[in-house]
Image: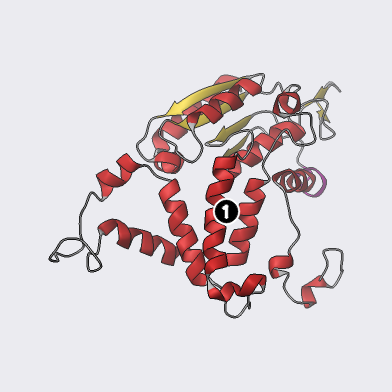
Amino acid sequence: ASVGDDDYVSKEVYSVDFPDVSVQDTVRLQLHMLQDELKISSVKCVIGGSFGGMQAVEYAAQAGSIKSPFAVDDDEGRAVPFVRSVVPIACGARHTAWQIAISEVQRQAIYADPKWNQGNPSWDDLPWAGLSVARQIGMVSYRTAKGYDKKFGRDLKEEVTPPYGSDARWEVKGYLEYQGYKFLSRFDPVTYLKLTEQMDSHDVGRNRGGAKEALSSVHIPALVLGIDSDVLYPLHEQDELASLLTNGELKVIKSDAGHDGFLLEQTQVADYISEFLSSHY
């Protein structure tokens, strides 16, 4: 089925043939839905973490300037940005080689599952084992060595002799296996591939003269949040992003949880966002 077909619903699922979609595409669609379909006059703040943070950056680039085609008029007829502020959390201005590499290892886990069938998986028998391993790889990148050691140490689920080897059921192993299993009820392998590929598309400077040029006309308030222990999206990337946003500021979440700190350190995140919103409105 092609995207332009009026009766595409009645045809076979796209599966791996689903078109490549970028973060820029996704945000542009959302903006049209907000303005054209929902008739929203303005957005006070776009807040997002990780993949959502990438979209928040795109909202700034596409609708955070009076030069934007999405700009609107205020009560006095002056052009104002459609998006009035953004809070990108735990992301950068682009997906780097490091992040693409981690995404690729996860995709390779799916490809290695025999049920991937060289890129022609059966929708009735998908490569679930590969997706489970992909998720487990992701769960390692979302946390830190210190966090894992604090949570699991070298603990075993049950004592064995010797306390290592094939019979050793490490607590951390059980955790990863459970996370991989639990993930299967929320995602399918093809969707996961397509979403990781979309994340890899993230580059706010693509076709805009680079990130600095892309964000040079964005003057709306921007709060960038980073986690001091984030291995996946290191803090220096949020520092760079805040400097690229002309009205940007960086706040640091203190945590041993790594990338997942933006989900787990809810009090810090809420306090930073509340302070930001109250100071600008």
Name the kind of residue labelled 1 in the image: Glu
Q: What residue span does the magenta drawing correspond to?
A: 34-39
Q: Nearer the viewer, residue 169 or 55?
A: 169
**Image side of residue 186 versus residue 73, left or right:** left
Q: Where is residue 271 drawn, in percent x and y?
A: 44, 29
The answer, for residue 90, to whether it is visible in the render is yes
Quick check: is 243 in the magenta stretch? no
- The picture quadrant where one finds residue 127 is bottom right
Task: Decide: is 76 above or below 104.
Answer: above
The answer, for residue 185, to whether it is visible in the render is no
- The picture quadrant where one finds residue 213 is top right
Tag 1: Cα neighbours inside 10 Å, few (<14), some, or many (≥20)?
Answer: some
The quadrant of the rendering that contains the C terminus is: top right
- Main SS, magenta region, reads helix
Q: Where is residue 168 drawn, in percent x and y?
A: 22, 64
Q: How is the image coloured?
A: secondary structure
Rendered residue at 43%/63% (across/down): 180
Q: Nearer the viewer, residue 232 or 66?
A: 232
From the image, tell me which residue sits under label 1: 104
